[in-house]
């Protein structure tokens, strides 16, 4: 099963919409609550980064019997130093984003902590693609 969402980079009120819809769909499909939570955290963090830094983009999620793979692509400025960006507390978020309570520098570390696999492909001037995989036991969901 596949999901695809256009993520606006111009309207902060829509930030998190795609991850919320995937979270609800996974619940309806009987995925385990732990896997739903991990997926939602990862996808929300990536989606917020896409909105704040990447100017929006596309979010896709593909559900298999034992995993979900989420891919988010933007055409933003890219991440110049991925190793630095992965450090807790490091942020390049503008002040107005921080005033809204975002931009604490925990997005990428939270994605790494909650995923089974995290791949970030990015370079200055070429956008960013984030691929997240969360595995789960299909026998552990509420409908199992």
Image (spheres, rainbow, N blue to C red):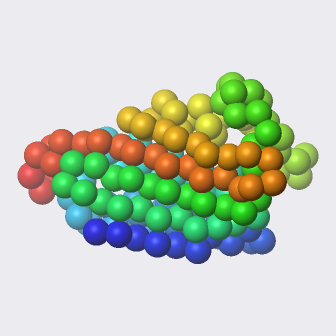
Which quadrant would residue 81 be assigned to in this image? top right
Instruction: Indicate whether 30 appears above or below 67.
Output: below
In this rendering, would 36 be left or right of 72? left
Instruction: Indicate whether 33 appears above or below 27.
Output: above
Q: Position of residue 108 (x, y in %)?
A: 62, 37
* Number of callouts: 0
Residue at image coords 33%, 53%:
68
In this rendering, would 63 be left or right of 111? left
Q: Is residue 51 among what the camera can see?
A: no
Residue at image coords 11%, 46%:
139
Q: Position of residue 41 (x, y in %)?
A: 49, 45
Residue at image coords 56%, 49%:
130
In this rendering, would 91 be left or right of 65? right
Q: Nearer the viewer, residue 8 or 76?
A: 76
Residue at image coords 73%, 68%:
9
Q: Position of residue 125 (x, y in %)?
A: 81, 54
Q: Is residue 55 among what the camera can see?
A: yes
Q: Nearer the viewer, residue 129 or 55?
A: 129
Q: Could you tell me which quadrant the N terminus lies in?
A: bottom left
In this rendering, would 22 be left or right of 129? left
In the image as oriented, which residue stretches furthest toward the right? 95
């Amino acid at each position: 099963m596949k999901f695809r969402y256009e993520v606006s980079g111009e309207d902060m009120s829509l930030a998190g919409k795609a991850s919320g819809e995937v979270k609800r769909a996974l619940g309806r499909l009987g995925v385990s609550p732990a896997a739903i939570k991990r997926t939602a955290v990862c996808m929300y963090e990536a989606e917020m980064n896409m909105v704040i830094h990447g100017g929006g983009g596309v979010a896709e999620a593909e559900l298999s019997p034992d995993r979900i793979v989420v891919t988010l692509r933007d055409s933003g400025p890219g991440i110049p130093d991925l190793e630095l960006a992965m450090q807790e507390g490091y942020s390049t978020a503008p002040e107005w984003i921080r005033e809204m309570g975002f931009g604490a520098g925990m997005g990428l570390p939270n994605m790494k902590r909650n995923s089974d696999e995290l791949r970030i492909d990015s370079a200055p001037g070429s956008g960013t693609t984030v691929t997240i995989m969360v595995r789960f036991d299909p026998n552990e969901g509420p409908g199992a």
